[in-house]
Image (cartoon, helix red, strand yellow):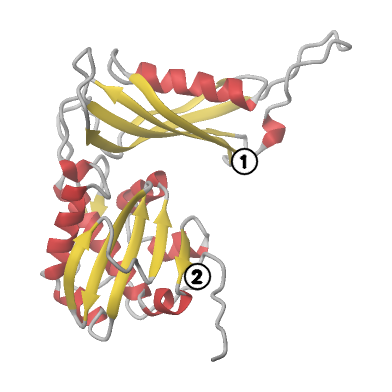
Amino acid sequence: MTHASGSAVGSITAGSRLFTGRFRQWGATALAAADALAAEVAAALPASATLLTADAEVRAPAAFPGPAGPESAAPAVTPELAADAMVTALAAGRTGIDGASTTAEVTACLRDERDEIALEVRLALLTALPEPSGLLCPGSKAWTAELGSRLTDDAEFARLIETYDGTIGLRIGGRDVHLRCYRGSVIEASARSILGADFLVSIPGAEFIELMQADHNAFMESAMMRRVSSSGSGYEYLRMTSALIRIVDIARAIAVDSGWADACADHVDASTVVGATVMPAGPAPVFEEV
């Protein structure tokens, strides 16, 4: 088992945790809490960090009681929630007027006393961080090319797809990766394919980081817990489950070699789970009689 040694202390890379376990009252409404959380994330990044996009998902509305009505003399009781924030990707972008040119994608969460997520906020911020390697952005052109190259040279992956003629689709943090395969060979690795993917496995950015940092290949657990979703051909998804597990093996090795924070890889010759099956996380396919 190999862990990334990381770069200089205090550096920010994919998988870096900006803060964790910050308990406080974040606001009586989900919107107020999301605003406060976004401000906290921006403060943890270089001073020039500018918010580009934000998306919030409220999972526990009861955690945000709302402001007290005019008929009530008592203020709304807002519970203390624990906050954590993690960088899920760093990407080079256009240079802003202040010289900032690196986009940091961050997932921040507020958790209740049971450690369950009450609010998740996904942010993209323009920062003054040094221009990153393309390998720090899963699903980027450089990362996809590296994945395709390693899979092409991987005998175990070739064995797992030796009867497959089709395209495996991944969506990592919103970025698509299509792997065109033909009987044991990876023909192309790109953001899209002409005929599309046979199936698409969607992995949120934060979940992908967790897969890279886990002490073993946890793709099966993520799929069974429905932390990833799938669409398209359920049959091909089931048939290629072991190949997907091997893809995660290779992605974990890329994360270690690229210096992701707390990345961990087993560096095994064979897939950590071979021949396993998993039920699709998305809707069951519908077959029509012909």
Q: Position of residue 186 (x, y in %)?
A: 18, 71
State whether residue 146 appears in this view: yes
Q: Is residue 1 visible?
A: no
Report the residue that reaches farthest toward the top.
Answer: 73
Q: Residues within 10 Å of mark 2 (few under 14, many from 20)?
A: many
Disc number for residue 191: none
* Residue ID for mark 1: 59
Residue 85: x and y in percent read 41, 31
The correct choice, above or below, for 40 with respect to 146 in the image is above
Which residue type carries mark 1? Answer: Arg
Q: Which residue is at 35% across, 81% downward?
A: 275
Residue 167: x, y in percent?
A: 30, 71
Name the foreground residue: 110 vs 148.
148
| Contact flag, marks 2 and 1 (Cβ < 8 Å) | no
Q: Residue at x 18, y 16 (%)?
A: 99
Q: Secondary structure at mark 1?
A: loop
Q: Nearer the viewer, residue 177 or 276?
A: 177
**Mark 2 = which residue?**
280
Q: Residue at x 15, y 29 (%)?
A: 131
In the rendered image, residue 109, in percent from the top left (x then y), is placed at: 50, 34
Q: Tag 2, which secondary structure?
A: loop
Q: What's the residue type where badge 2 is placed?
A: Pro
Give the Cα separation between the discs numbered 2 and 1: 23 Å
Q: 96 left or right of 222?
A: left
Give the number of marks: 2
Quadrant occupied by the C terminus: bottom right
Residue at horizontal 55%, vertical 82%?
287
Of all residues, the one furthest to the right in this rendering is 71
Q: Quadrant of residue 96?
A: top left
Placement of 232 over or under 252, stated as above or below: below
Which quadrant of the structure image shows residue 190? bottom left
Most extreme residue toward the bottom, as rendered?
A: 290
